[in-house]
Structure formats: structure tokens, C-alpha cells
Amino acid sequence: MNVLVINAGSSSLKYQLMNPETGDVSAKGLCERIYIDGRLTHKVGDKKVEKDIPMPTHAEAIQAVLGILVDPVDGVIKSVDEIDAVGHRVLHGGMEFSDSCIIDDEVIAAIEKCIPLGPLHNPANLMGIRACQAVMPKTPQVAVFDTAFHMTMPPKAYRYAIPTEYYKNDDIRRYGFHGTSHKYIARRAAALVGKTDFKMVNCHLGNGSSMSAIKDGKCVDTTMGLSPLAGVPMGTRSGDIDACVVQFICNKYNMSVDECLNMLNKKSGVLGLSDGLSSDFRDLEAGAEQGNEACKLALEKFYYEVAKYVGAYAAALNGIDVLTFTAGVGENGITTRQAVCDYLGFMGVKIDPEKNKIRGKETLISTPDSKVQVWIIPTNEELMIAQDTAELVNAAK
Ligand code: AMP
């Protein structure tokens, strides 16, 4: 089966053509500068092709993708009919979606209803969906939501302690994000541990970071909230912050709330703490090694907050069996994993520094006598999207 996985942003569109059973990717690429001029980067194995193709809308971007997939020289399929289904990443499923689903008019209307919750991403995701429907009307399309995995959280985890009317009238609550990644890691962890009934904390640490408390494969709490701004400090996002900070800054600097939120989303996190030096953990590690105090503080703050959430979730779950690290920093950050685990010795977490010296490979890094198994598990959101898509399309046959 061939599934085309699409992740449409406001001016970009990423794609992968993959086999959901084997995880083999036959081609992948990126359309950029949609609405501006249009640039396609297409990769088959090690071969990379770059082309300037006019993309006045997402529809032309999708056409460019299909065009290159069937191209006699750079393509990997003979006809678009060889694409059995399309899986779309959709950011916000609000309270409408607790799982992936086959796209029809009702689903599109419900994704539209969630636009106030995901004002930047959902419209772009919808443009990707509509563009695919226009150029391949007979191919089934599936929506996979970043929020869906977290819909199993109990009210005590997802409700904010603010007047009920905002929840009842406006759906204001914790939703959580990176759900496709958390779901993939929960499934891989179950396969690696060899059982399904266990308690784990997954640390998805990348440019955006979130953590989830997971019991028997289901999410019971997560760090991101109504938006992806909440939780641990990130590359450029502040993470959790006292709402009065916004009030103070807006009043003092005559900023609008939107301007202040832009600062919290784009200029904060480890970038802000490192005095604007970098949001990239490799730069921060290099800076810290050279004695830069701001870089040291940025990293220390990050390790501290990640460890604090592991502790909080261990309390929420009444102990944990497994701790997993994934995404750019989680998979590659040797120092980060060591520093986080150093905080967790009190709960029996013990990692082997030698086993920890590894990047991007599925590896058990805890010692045999550790009370908690600690794993590095590289995430694969595209594969999860392709698998959900295949499952739904096959079930509907
Ligand atoms: P992601 O958003 O998942 O792509 O992760 C991006 C983050 O991973 C960036 O902050 C990178 O600095 C970080 N990263 C990638 N490779 C390494 C590495 N070798 N050591 C530490 N951090 C890394």
C-alpha cells in the first residue's frame, strides 16, 4: 500500500510517500514559498532534486508533488492511481476529534470549527486537504490530529482552574500536542518492553518540547495546553508562565497581548535565556563548554523543568516503569538525557553513561538494576500518520 503523508503549513507543504507496513519511504520532499513563487525539493534515497515551480496556492503545490512523484526520471510511481490514500497532519482537533478519521464534508466542517483553537495551522491544514481533494477526488483522505492522543486525559488533568463558563462556552481546556509522536512512542515502547499494561513518561524534546504521562498506552496528562506554548521551556517558547507576566509586560511596554504572545512564542525559551544566542541545543552546549553563563543557565533551566515534570507525572501515575526520550534533543542530546536522569536517582532511575553515548537509535540506556527502564526511541510521526491512514482505509473497504 502507498500512503502519501501531507503536512501542510501556511506557506509550505511537506510530503512523504510511504509503505505503512514496512515504513519504507519511496520519496519525500518539501514545497516552500507557496503564495510567493514556489520551490520544490524532492528526495528519492540519496538523490535530491530542486525545482522552481509556480505555486500561487496549495493546489499547485500538491500538483507539483504529484507531478514529480510520477515523473519518468525523478518519480517513483507510474500513475497517481498508485497512491492508495492520503494522510493529513492536522494540528487542532479540539473536542471534536479523539482519533484519526476519514475525511468527509462533516469532518471538514468540524476542522473548520476548530480554527479559533489553531488559528495559524488549521486553515493551512485545510488548504492541503482541499488541494488533494481537488486533484485526486477518488483517493481516500484521512485526518490525523496532533491533539487526538491526549483526549483520554481525565478532567482533573485537562480542566483549567478558571470559571466553568470558559470551558462550557469556549472549549478552553488543556488539549496537548505532538500527539502523533507520543502515540508512536507509546506503541514502540510497548513493543520493546513486551507488554501493554505499564506506566511511562515520554519526553518529546526538540525545538518544540512536550511530555506525556501514559498509562496502558493511553495519555493521562501532558505538558502543552490550549496551545503549544505551555509546558517545559522550548527552543523559542517560554513554556509555563504566570499570566501576570503578560499583564505586566503589556502595561509597561505598551505592547498588545498579541505582541507579547509573539515574544513568548518566538523570542523566549532557551533562546531568550541564552540572551538571544541560539535556540539550537548544539549551539548552547558549545557555548556552555566555552563558559558562557547564559547558555549554562538556559540548559540548566531546561533539564530542571523536564526533570520536574517527570517527577510530577511519576506522582500522577503512582510510579513509572518506563521513561522514553525522543525528538531532536531527546534522541541526540547525550548531555540532556544524563542531566535529566541525574535528577531522578531518588526514584530509582539509573542510566549507563556508556550506553547513553548514542544518537538517534532505539536503545535501552538504563542499567539492569534501574527501577525504571530508560529508552531512546526515535520518533516517526509520518509512519504513525501512514499507519492510522491505512488502518482506517482498510477497515472502510
Ligand atoms: P526537532 O525539533 O525534533 O527537529 O529537534 C531540533 C533540536 O534538536 C535542535 O535544538 C537541535 O539542536 C537538537 N539536536 C539535534 N542534534 C543534536 C545533538 N547532536 N545534540 C544535541 N541536540 C541536538
Image (tube, rainbow, N blue to C red):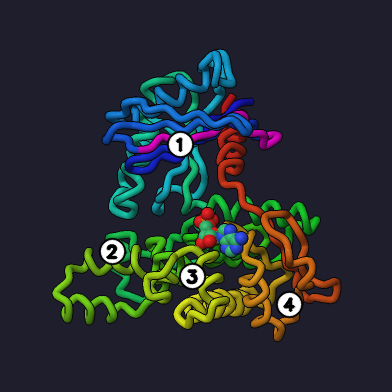
For badge 1, the amino acid type reads: Leu
The residue that mark 3 highlights is 157
For marks 2 and 1, the one nearer the N-term is: 1
Q: Distance between the residues labelled 1 and 3?
A: 37 Å
Q: Where is residue 117 in the image (x, y as percent from the top left)?
A: 33, 55
> Dot 2 lies on which element?
helix
Tell me the residue at 28%/53% (across/down). Answer: 116
Which of the two marks, 4 or 3, is nearer to us in this view? 4
Residue span colored magenta: 21-32
The residue that mark 2 highlights is 262
For badge 2, the amino acid type reads: Asn
Q: Main secondary structure of the magenta part?
A: strand
> Dot 4 lies on which element?
loop
Q: CB under 8 Å between callouts 4 and 2? A: no
Q: Which quarter of the figure has residue 53?
A: top left
Query: Which one is in front, 99 or 225?
Result: 225
Tell me the residue at 71%/83% (across/down). Answer: 345
Tell me the residue at 55%/70% (across/down). Answer: 286
- Is 24 part of what is drawn in magenta? yes
- State whether label 2 is within 8 Å of ligand 1: no
Which of the two marks, 2 or 3, is nearer to us in this view? 2
For badge 3, the amino acid type reads: Ala
Mark number, residue 349: 4
Query: Which one is in front, 123 or 207?
Result: 207
Q: How far apart are marks 2 and 3 (CA)?
A: 26 Å
